[in-house]
Amino acid sequence: MQSYSDPPRSLDELQSATPGPGYDIHHIVEQGQAEDEGYPREAIDSLDNLVVIPRMKHWEINQWYQTRSPEFGWQTPRDYLEGRNWAVKRSVGLEALKIVGVLKP
């Protein structure tokens, strides 16, 4: 629970952190969709696509990806991103980290 109160960090800090109790490794570009769309595991699991975040924030991000939003034409972010390129997926993934207060704006 204490990890939930962590202040926002820079992308470098999130990428270089070591996961411990209460933390998860999170894929900036969602791994399931990326894999389904044929992106190589080397890209999906690259250090550039991985961050260490509080577990409960990870759950919030997963919920956010499943919630319809006017920003995405009343689609869920996950549906909106289907078939879009890596750069768009990454941009939305970074925005999700900011929305839940993990990544510094």
Image (cartoon, rainbow, N blue to C red):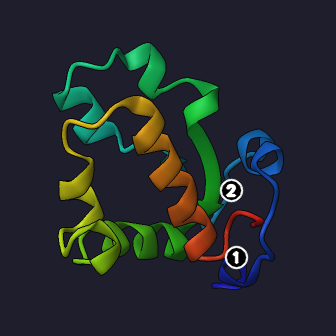
**Where does the N terminus fall, quadrant-wise?**
bottom right
Residue highlighted by disc 1: 3
Give left or right: position of 80 versus 97: left
Instruction: Identify the amino acid type marked 1.
Output: Ser
Rendering coords of residue 102 (x, y %)? 67, 68
Rendering coords of residue 96 (x, y %)? 50, 64
Up/down of 22 relative to 13, above or below: below
Q: CA distance from mark 2 to mark 1?
A: 10 Å
Label 2 CA crowd tier, 10 Å (few <14, some 14–19, many 20+): few
Residue 20's tag is 2
- Residue depicted at x 72% and y 41%: 15
Question: What is the quadrant of residue 3 in the picture?
Answer: bottom right
- Residue depicted at x 77% and y 76%: 6
Up/down of 89 relative to 54, above or below: above
For numbered disc 2, what is the local secondary structure? Answer: loop
Up/down of 54 relative to 85, above or below: below
- Residue depicted at x 81% and y 62%: 9
**Where does the C terminus fall, quadrant-wise?**
bottom right
Give left or right: position of 22 versus 39: right
Rendering coords of residue 20 (x, y %)? 68, 56
Rendering coords of residue 100 (x, y %)? 57, 76
Question: What is the quadrant of residue 82 in the picture?
Answer: top left
- Residue depicted at x 36% and y 44%: 30
| Viewer-nearest residue: 77 or 6 | 77
Give left or right: position of 82 versus 23: left
Give left or right: position of 102 versus 66: right
Label 1 CA crowd tier, 10 Å (few <14, some 14–19, many 20+): some
Instruction: Identify the amino acid type marked 2.
Output: Gly
For numbered disc 1, what is the local secondary structure? Answer: helix
Residue 40's tag is none
